[in-house]
Image (tube, rainbow, N blue to C red):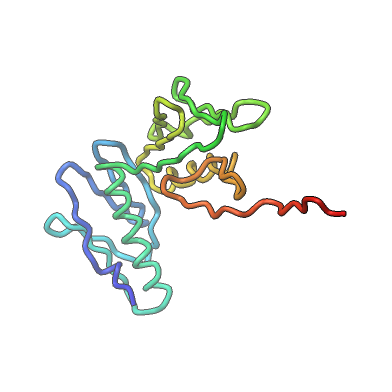
Amino acid sequence: MSRIGRSPIELPSKVKFEVDKGNRVTVTGPKGTLVQQIDPDLTLKVEEGQILVERPTESRHHKSQHGLARTLVANMVTGVTTGFSRKLEVVGVGYRAEKRGENLMLQVGKSHPVEFAPPNKTISFDVDKDGRGIVINGVDKAEVGELAAVIRRTRPPEPYKGKGIRYSGERVRSKVGKSGKVGKK
């Protein structure tokens, strides 16, 4: 059984951590500010430069919320200090990505280029010079992952030639094409 909730979260000196009465957590750091609502049954304390999450009982609900709350707060602290990034690869002849201003433009075999605008100021795009690699940077881990999934969904990798947008390091299982019967009489 996992004991994720019991492990303390290191609080860097440049990060400001606040909890109000309704367990609304605010974490402010050099990269920005994140706000998250945590289960009101749990208690969050700061002791000796560490954040501790404690549960009131050993019930199944409190155990699951304990681990979740600890992970959410840890991701908030990591996000405002170092940030998160997700890498995507564009594979296919004529498929490419480019950055226009703050927006991301994709040409992936559709009749028109597909444009993505960052949903807020904390998200940014980086594109390789050859237009084959996309990096999504941001403070909120969930936002970065969701935006990467939406971009990938515009042209997911197809199994015959492997063309499309995929996560960096993702393996696409290839299928064999049609077995043409030649010379049938």
Residue 35 percent across, percent down from the top left: 36, 46
Residue in the image at 21% along x and 44% along y: 15
* 41 w.r.t. 150: above or below: below
Residue 5 percent across, percent down from the top left: 30, 67
Q: Nearer the viewer, residue 10 or 1?
A: 1
- Residue extending furthest top? 101
Q: In this view, does 3 lie to the left or right of 159?
A: left
Residue 96 percent across, percent down from the top left: 52, 29
Q: In which quarter of the image is the C terminus?
A: bottom right
Q: In this view, does 129 lie to the left or right of 31?
A: right
* 101 w.r.t. 44: above or below: above
- Residue extending furthest right? 185
Residue in the image at 43% along x and 26% along y: 130
Residue in the image at 83% along x and 54% along y: 184
Residue 180 percent across, percent down from the top left: 74, 51
Q: Which of 45 and 181 is in front in this view?
A: 181
Q: Nearer the viewer, residue 113 or 77?
A: 113
Q: In which quarter of the image is the N terminus?
A: bottom left
Q: In which quarter of the image is residue 110?
A: top right
Q: Is residue 69 left or right of residue 155?
A: left
Residue in the image at 29% along x and 53% along y: 19
Q: How many marks?
A: 0
